Image (cartoon, helix red, strand yellow):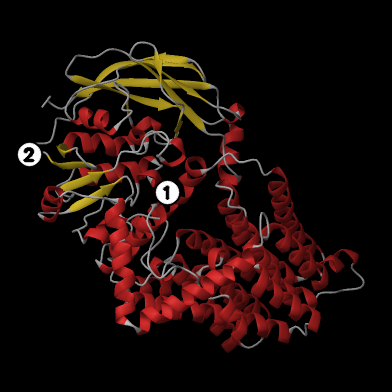
Amino acid sequence: MLALTALTLPSYPVLPDIGIDPSWQIGIITAFQHHLNFGTDIIWSYGPYGWLDVPFLFDLSLPRLAIVASICANLLFLSLLAAQLWRRGANVLVWVVVAAIIGLVVEWSAYITFGASITFAAILLLIFAFDARQIRYQLAEVGSAGALLALGSLVKGTDLVVGAGLLVVAVAFGVLFKRRYLAMTAVFALLSFLLLWIVSGEALSSIPAYVRGIYETASGYSAAMSRDYSYSLLLGVSVLLLLLLAYGVLIALFVRDQTLAFALSLCVPIAFVAFKEGFVRHTYPSFFEPLLVLLCVLAPTVVARASPSALLVRSFRPAWWCVAGLIIGILFTTFPGPYFVESRVTTGDNVRKVVLSTLSESSRQQQQDRITAAINQRYPLSDSDLAALRDGTVDVMPWDTVLVYGYHLNWNPRPVLASYAAYTPYLDHVDAAHLASAEAATHILYYFYDYAGELDNRYALYDEPEAYRALLENYRVADNNGPLLLERRATPMADAATAAGQSCSQLGSWIAVPSAAPDRFVYASVAAPYSLVGRVLNTAYKPAELRITFQYGSGLQSPSFRLIGAVAPDGLLISGYAETQDQFADLFRGRVDNPITAFQVSVPSGAGDYSGQVCATFVSREMPASS
């Protein structure tokens, strides 16, 4: 177990890099340190204990605790798994295969985080509790499982979803099979959640908003973040494995093997969430890696369930499960190269840096100086811009929060940490309400990304349309020589809309943009509803993506941008197309460089996921005064 713990140490770099992911990682750590309320002040796919998953050493107290917590989580899971193997009388082959999968095949540091480790541990505790005969063991095990699930739900949003699924399974089996103590798992989870929430310094009133924010972030992910990669074989194998897992539950119930049915049912929620995470953006190892661990979790339970009289149950024998899991792991985690070997080198190097940084203040300072210099080089700011930013508060759009760390700025973020993740009307609205309020930052640094630079080829103005309109109405351009530096207007613009007509057409047809008065912008609320197939795919897998294209100027045509259908009804600025940062800045000055005459909403593939009709409702609003 000690050897496996060493092999499964977290391999995060000592200090954050530069880019999208380091920006939100720094954001959740800084939000916790600044005592911002998750759910109201900050909305993200991580919770107030999210820093346990990203133990960067830019502040020693939290990372030290996160590193210790990660080691303890791994050791807890491995100890419970070993106890289960021992208790079930697993033979040497099962021990060796399970150890090989966990220690060598699974890329632990990349796909099995702190939250996942404690969730796996909670599953084992619930399996123990299901077979326990003494009430003190039953309560101790369901209580510990509930506490771990509560902690996981405050680390990452998907762990909240998984935890809710596990609690439903525990309560259902407790009622169906007269093990009512299993229902106490939900009580312990709720009490632990409240205690951990209070300890983190969060306001109790923020809990409903936190749950709502996690739901919105999870519900909008499929349509907004999916990528259209063709891995049909991998997808087919993954669906087959999920079906086999569900089939196993049915067979176990049919032969009245309650323990096996319970263990398999507990694996269904985490396997489904891993499937969604793995195949929405097609980072497919993030499905197979947790599934391999689940096979190891199931193996001890399966080994005691070899009933010779039931032919179908023999398929659950551990030799088949573990050998099949090992083969699948080797096939999928070594494509296109044996990175599970290379990652051990990376892990060892990062562990060495962690030890040096923890023990040596000078070593840590040198590393911090290097990353700060890299941030300053990647995001150069003039002395005048820095002076303005330090005389007030600052937010960064659309996602480059890392420069707040590099320049030690007074950060005052909008709720959603990055614009690309405000992909539901609720998330768009809370950002817009914040930007329009007196609590918003005095300055905003906006890095305009064109078609090639924007995430997933989106159009920057349409990531969060309502929030962008609030930005336009409440901020003005202070400097456009580097990034766009915006400062609050002395008087916000009037927010009065005038109806400008409606137009409907088929997907792929062009929709003309109505003209407006010279001092007004035209906005379009665009709706392209799903078909029944699209709604099912949005839940079970992912729907086809929408695209939007503009005709502007004298017969010119823009690239085909990805359109997030959920926020398209929030009001897309359709008066002019901003291709560059200068043209983007001109919109804040009431100037339209590329007037849009028509736009087209299309579906490159999978048109059956939509009803086939697109409707646009147009309004005009006051534009900023030319300056």
Give neighbour class at mark 2: few <14, some 14-19, many 20+ (Cα, 10 Å): few
Q: Is residue 68 left or right of residue 473?
A: right
Instruction: Say what amino acid the circle numbered 2 marks.
Output: Ala
Which residue is at the front of the view, 41 or 459? 459
| Residue 340 rendering spot, x and y as whole percentages | 63, 66
Disc sitting over residue 216 in the figure: 1
| Residue 346 rendering spot, x and y as whole percentages | 53, 69
The quadrant where residue 316 appears: bottom right
Q: Is residue 298 left or right of residue 150?
A: right
Give neighbour class at mark 1: few <14, some 14-19, many 20+ (Cα, 10 Å): many
Please tell me whether residue 28 is drawn above or below residue 439 in the rendered image: below
| Residue 494 rendering spot, x and y as whole percentages | 14, 30
Q: Secondary structure at mark 2?
A: loop
Give the residue displayed 25% in from the left and 53% down from the top: 413
Disc sitting over residue 98 in the figure: none
Q: Is residue 417 left or right of residue 507?
A: left
Name the residue that disc number 2 marks. Answer: 490
The quadrant where residue 620 appears: top left
> For the C terminus, which image quadrant?
top left
Give the residue displayed 67% in from the left and 83% down from the top: 82
